[in-house]
Amino acid sequence: MIARYLLDTHILSWWLRSPQRLSADQRRVIRKAAGRGEGLPLSAVSLVELAVAHGVGNRRGPAIAGALLRDLEQDPSFVVLPVTFDIAVEVATMGAILQDPNDRTIVATARVHRLTLITADQRIIGSKLVATIS
């Protein structure tokens, strides 16, 4: 089945480690998509964000980040979408509404692939650059 949603980095992290942090709508949509056998896409930039967020700041960080990334790699329900030339062009053309390059890349990935972004990021939601589930 064709995927309809893109997971933002925070949503992905919360889904894997603390799903109670997700909104009821986010949990419902992710569960239904997984139940239908849809892949759960994420931008390749989210892998880097996870590595940095979970790997920096304490002695065990790299081990935690490594375990999280290995879990993702081994779970066939997650689909990593590469950063392509089309996505880079979309990043360049979306204006200055979003300043964070990772946020811009995630939004551009959703736009290029025509996916609804599951996010809790108020800057992305407020930008109205992409359809969101918050």
Image (spheres, rainbow, N blue to C red):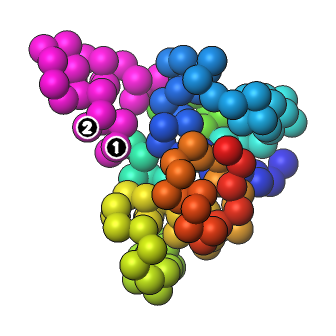
Say which of 65 and 82 sits in front.
65
Residue 57 point in image, percent of width and height: 16, 25
Q: Amino acid at mark 1?
A: Glu
Does the residue at mark 1 contact the one at mark 2 (Cβ under 8 Å)?
yes
Residue 26 point in image, percent of width and height: 72, 36
The residue range painted magenta reads: 48-72
Residue 42 point in image, percent of width and height: 55, 48
Q: Tell me the number on the disc at residue 49.
A: 1
Q: Tell me the number on the disc at residue 52.
A: 2
Query: Main SS type for the magenta part?
Result: helix
Q: Amino acid at mark 2?
A: Val
- Classify 113 as above or below 124: below
Q: Is residue 56 magenta?
A: yes
Q: CA distance from mark 1 to mark 2?
A: 5 Å
Residue 50 in view, yes or no: yes
Taking the spot 36% from the left edge, 36% from the top edge, the residue there is 50
